[in-house]
Amino acid sequence: MAFEKLLQRIMDSDVNIRHTIVADLDVDIIAVNHREGVTNFLSREETAASLKRAAEAWKARKQLESKIGKGSYAVAAFEKITRITFPLGENNLLFVSLGSEQMRQNLNAGGQQQIVQHVLNILSGDPTLE
């Protein structure tokens, strides 16, 4: 599946997802999808720095895989956003940014755990799990 299609599918899964990015482990951005009408809180440079820190943390987790198993996702929660990082194959990461509980566009849509489950289901390739 092309990364652009994957990002669109994830964006379509919940209105509270603000932004999705696929980057390699060197933080070279491969694909981006941004919800129309949503303003970024960070500049491009700040976003790149944030992604770099997340990628470095993911690389550190990979060093422990033999002892604790493969990582499924990591969550960084802030007052205004929550960023969830998922491994995407061996060499890429998927970053999903959603509004904080206070900033949700639609409180009837999924919360953090439901969004994580939707994304994991999409990544598993089993459409019956979505």
Image: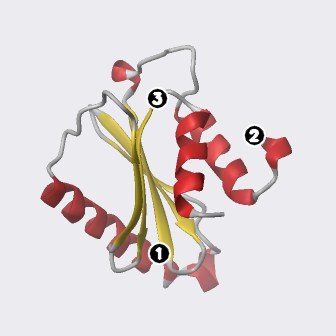
Near mark 3 (Cα within 10 A), the count class, few <14, some 14-19 or many ≥20, is many
Disc nearest the viewer among 2 and 1: 2
Q: Mark 2–mark 1 contact, CB under 8 Å?
A: no
Q: What amino acid does circle 3 point to?
A: Asn
Instruction: Write the residue at 34% across / 65% down.
Output: 54
Q: Looking at the rendering, in which quadrant would you find the N terminus?
A: bottom right
User: Which residue has dot 2 on it?
Assistant: 130
Q: Nearer the viewer, residue 118 or 73?
A: 118
Tell me the CA gap for discs 2 and 1.
27 Å
Q: Secondary structure at mark 1?
A: helix
Near mark 2 (Cα within 10 A), the count class, few <14, some 14-19 or many ≥20, is some
Q: Is residue 129 above or below residue 30?
A: above
Q: Secondary structure at mark 3?
A: loop
User: Which residue has dot 3 on it?
Assistant: 16
Q: What amino acid does circle 2 point to?
A: Glu
Q: What amino acid does circle 1 point to?
A: Arg
User: Which residue has dot 1 on it?
Assistant: 61
Instruction: Write the residue at 39% across / 35% down.
Output: 35
Quadrant for residue 24, please give it.
bottom left
Residue 90 coordinates in the image, percent (x, y):
57, 80
- Give the mark nearer the N terminus: 2 vs 1: 1
